[in-house]
Structures are given as C-alpha cells and as structure tokens.
Amino acid sequence: MEPVRRIVGRALPLARADVDTDQIIPSQWLKRLERTGYGPGLFEAWRKDPAFVLNDPRYDGAVVLLAGANFGSGSSREHAVWALLDAGFRAVVAPRLADIFRNNALRNGLVPVETDADTVAKLVDTVRRDPTTSIAIDVERSTVEAPGLRATFVLDEFSRTRLLEGLDDIAVTLRHERDIGAFEAKRPEWLPRVR
Amino acid sequence: MGTTLSEKVWERHVVRRAPGEPDLLYVDLHLVHEVTSPQAFEGLRLAKRRVRRPELTLATMDHNVPTNDEPAEEISARQIEAMARNAREFGIRCYPTGDPRQGIVHVISPQLGLTQPGMTIVCGDSHTSTHGALGALAWGIGTSEIEHVLATQTIALTKPGTMAVIVEGVLPMDCAAKDVILGIIARIGTAGGTGKVIEYRGAAIRALSMEGRLTICNMSIEAGARAGMVAPDEVTFAWLEGRPFAPKGVQWQQALDDWRALATDADARFDSEVAIDASALRPYVTWGTNPAQSVTIDGDVPDPDALPAATRESARRALRYQDLTPGTPMREISVDAVFIGSCSNARLEDLRSAAEVVRGRHVRSGIRGLVVPGSMGVKADAEREGLDRIFTDAGFEWRDAGCSMCLGMNPDILRPGERCASTSNRNFEGRQGPGGRTHLVSPAVAAATAIAGHFALPSDLR
Ligand code: SF4
C-alpha cells in the first residue's frame, strides 16, 4: 500500500444515507479476478440516470466522496473500495461508515473520514454552492478542512500509522510469528481440521 | 464483574496484545469461496507466501455457480476454475460443484459440524455472522483480510462492543425465526448494531431450533452488527453430536465441558440491551430497499410523511424504486417470482415449512417459483423426505445448491420491474437483478404467496 498523508481536491456531494455495497458495485462486477478495472461499475445502476450527481461534469475529477450515514453497508466485497479508488476517490467523508467497508478502506489507503453529521452537511452545502471548492484531508492531524470550516475525525493511532507509512499488514504480523506458534501449540485437540 | 459470551471467545483467541494496537486474534476456521478470494491468492503468489494452516481452511463454490444443468457462462467459469486451481496450488480442501458436500458456505459448515461453540470463524462474506448460532464468534472480512488470514491464520482487530437482544415470550403460531429477526431490525435499524456483537438471549431464542438460530444470526449484519451469537445449549450439542467434524469419544466429553463454560456470566454487563416481546410479533414483509423497511403482513405500505424525519427521504426513494403506493395493504401486492433459498432460509427445516404449505396446491399461474437448497446435503435430505416431489408437483423449479437468486450473479435473476417474495436477507436495489424488486419474507409466507399470487399467510389459503 502507498503511504497517504494528505488529500487535497474537489468533492462529490453524494449525500445519501444507507448506500449499500450492491449500489457501489453491483454483483455482476464481482466476477473479475483482478483488483483493478472496477471504475466503470461504480454506482452503475444510478449512473443510468443523467441527473445522478456522478454524471454532473462540474464534479469531474473529485477525489473526496461526501456520503451519508451508514455508507458501505451490506456485503464484505472489497470491490466497493477498489471501484471508488479506480474512479479517482481517495477519501470518503460520512457521519458513519459500515464496519467492514471501513476496514476494507483502511487496507487500501482509501481514507475513511467519520465526522459529525453537521460538518458533513456543511461540506455538502459548500460544494454544491461552488463545485470547485477544494477540500483538504490531513491524515496525520485527522482534520478535514474547507474554506471557513475545520473539523476533526476519528482515526485510531494504529490505523493512522498504517496509512502514513503504507505498511504491509502481513509483514507486520509475521514479525510476531513466535507468538502465533506459541498460541497454536496450546489449542485444544478437539478443534476441527479439514482433511 | 463477569464477562459475556463474545468477550470470552475473544479473550481465548488473543495471540498478542499491545497498547495502542488492535488485538491479534487467532482464527480457528477460515471459509473461502470463489468470488472474494482470487485477488487474495494472487497477492500470496506475488509475495511468495504460503497458506499457514491449510487444514484450518475450507473452500467451496457457491455465489457464482449454476443451479441447473446449464454450464456456467465464460466469466463465471473462469472464477470457478480459479478457485479450484488456487485450492490445489495452496493445498486447501475444496468442495467443488458436483461434490455432495458443496453448497453455500454458511450452510455447509454448520451442517458438517465444522462450526463449533467457542471458535473464531471468518470468511470473505458478510453473512459469516450465521455461524454465531452455535456460539462461535464469526464475522465477514474483505479480500485484503482474507490474504492476511491465509498467510498468518490471525487477524488484527479492535475489540467490538457488546449488545444483548433479549426476546422473551412465546412466538405466535405463524411466526418463524425470520420474523423475529425482521422484527428486531425494524426496531433497532440497519445501523443499530454498528461496532457490536449482538448476543440473542431469552426464552424465545432458547426455544428455537438450530436452523432458526442460524437464520437469526445470519441477519445480524443487516442490523450493522459485527457478529451475532447464541450461547451454546442442549439444542447446540444435539445438533453437533455425530456430525462429520464434531469431536468424538473422550474429546466430545472434553469439548462439552468446555462449551458449557462459555455462557455469559450472570453479573456480566452489555454495552446496550434491547428487549423484544415475542408474543407481539407477526409475520413481516419488507416494503423498501433495506431490511429495516418492513411492516407486518397485516399492515399497509407506509406513508413516508408519517415516518420519522430522518428516514423519510430514503423511504420516498425506496417506494419509487419499488413502485408502491402508500396505503396499499401488503396482502394486495402481487408478485412475479418467489425465491426460496439463500443462507438465510434454505436449510431442511425451511424447506419442510414451505413444502407443508404448498403440498397438494399449485403455484399461481404466471409466477416463477424457485426452490434452491442451501447445500447438496440439504438437497439430498429433502429428497429422501420427498420434498422435491411436493415442490415440483406444485409447479416450483427444484435446483442444485448455490446462492442463485439471492444476489443474481448466476443466470437466476429478476427482470427489470419484476417483483419477488424472497426468503433471502437483502432487499437492496437491484440485488436480485437490475431493476428487480425484492420483498423479504419467511419460507412459509413465501410459499403461501406463491400459491395466492400476492403476499399471504398459510392460514389465508383456502
Ligand atoms: S446466499 Fe446470498 S447472502 Fe448468503 S452467501 Fe450467498 S449471496 Fe451471500
């Protein structure tokens, strides 16, 4: 994973609550064997509507998605995160993100920005009024800024370091291989093994 | 102060704990399927890593597979072949299509006795919460985490919160486990369990069969929870005894002693508690596009203006998508298709309850009825009882095991605008095919609806 320190750029005001992963990337797109190439499938069904915000050229090049509460609910498909990244997004701002989606985002360097509903609403307003507004997200300080607005978001220490340093999670865990081995030696005999 | 079931299972699996870091947890069982795993195996290959414990890993094919005699189309076939290849290359046991043990991953593992109390189980699928019905701590993970578990047999996670959903009282006659969980989600909402493990407690939960508990835990994720659990008891032990992977002989006794110690202590406290009166529940039907948007079958399509302000906009959008008018009685809504299947409701008990309703009757003309057993094992059991004949005589299609119309990855999809009564767990827009409209119900209501042509209870049929 590439390190992520700061994201600066335009935002897309999606501003809908309960957007599930089936909307972010429909199941027909889950047949691919790669981690890339999902961009065209992002919000595929909604995109058929010319009035859908993603079709509005004023928001072309947006790197921040302004979402509603409970964004990313539903399935565990990491393809939802891959599709957002593939379409150019680097951060998702919402009052609350679904658990698995948030985990998946962190593992791919898509910054999950959970901040209060009021801040999200203000950001949406600002961007709707002026789509060229630039939003800055600072991972180290956990802040999101727009002209006349500055808010913080919740990011635990571990996740922050992981984003800032672009760590390979598996390599980090394998440093503790001795602990894993010691644990394995004590597991009860009756636990099932697939043979 | 005592600890809860989920905390006990968590603590037993901590491999490493350090300040400011998530716990590193050991994974007892990793279930793998063809759709979310290819990129994880590819990652291992690129980094020249192996699977640490192949014998704690089981693969099958379910999401993509055809459930009739047609061959899989080319792209699905590629994914199915990739699963077989990856399993071979990394030394993992795989139950492929055509194997008598193949089926939906969350149906086969409990059925084979692989899912046991006190275990940690993960799978690249959000409905892994299903396995909590046996007292396991089980949750869905993404593809990067799959790769991590394959390589290390562990997962790094922050400890979830705890929530108790206590269901007391006796469930009315025509209510099933599905109605209990739909009722719970209607009450706590799609984010009601966010960040928490729900423990389902109370007399009404104890009274449920293992199949019913699996249905309830299955939909924990629909309430936003990380996982759902039921404390192991005599129902659990009776279910497990004698299954292929269950402990045998002396080990069975050791395991039983261990499992009995898992229950939440009397003085333990949950972060939050919700009480539900089972006797006040009714069969539910969803009207909207998330599982919290439901009413009882005696109700009407709601008027968004009468709903709490925060849910109004999404209710309006849902009604537009579902093409429903406020005030319409649910019983007057007719359907084009009925799907009895999925990891929510395609176990033997579910098929029996549907078969009982359709026996000697016929599916309303114009309705497509699909019965897709959750596993080839369930299919074989059902056929031994003659359930297949009851369904086919009534005009249903009787299929092989797979996810099928639950998520519409194989050719079993709704056409745009078609309306379906479905025993699955998600009614998201387009879930069963682009433009399709899904209403979640229990197997008995799905069966009665197929006969009546509109939403109905078995007792509505003449
Ligand atoms: S049956 Fe449906 S919910 Fe269950 S694993 Fe398959 S696709 Fe997911």
Image (tube, coloured by chain):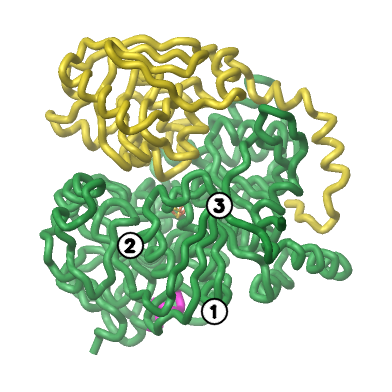
Residue holding disc 2: B440
For the residues labelled 2 and 3, the Cα–Cα distance comes to 30 Å
Q: Where is residue B70 drawn, in percent x and y?
A: 39, 53
Judge from the rendering whether residue B70 lies leftward or rightward of residue B428; answer left or right.
right
Find numbered disc 1 in the image and state the secondary structure of the residue it sits on. Answer: helix
Q: Between tags 2 and 1, which lies in front?
A: 2
Q: Colour of chain A?
A: yellow
Could you tell me if residue A141 is visible in this image? Answer: yes
Residue holding disc 1: B384
Determine if marks 2 and 3 fall on one subunit: yes
The verdict on label 1 being within 8 Å of ligand 1 is: no
The relative height of residue B63 versus residue B102 in the rendered view (above or below) is above
Chain under disc 3: B
What residue span does the magenta drawing correspond to?
Answer: B351-356
The relative height of residue B275 versus residue B409 in the rendered view (above or below) is below
Disc with the residue nearer the chain's start (2 vs 1)? 1
Q: Colour of chain B?
A: green
Residue holding disc 3: B271
The relative height of residue A128 versus residue B306 in the rendered view (above or below) is above
Q: Between tags 2 and 3, which lies in front?
A: 3
Chain under disc 2: B
Determine the residue positioned at 61% across, 24% down: A158
Determine the residue positioned at 87% across, 46% down: A186
Residue B354 covered by magenta stretch: yes
Count every numbered label the image shows and give the total: 3
Q: Where is residue B349 drawn, in percent x and y?
A: 50, 75
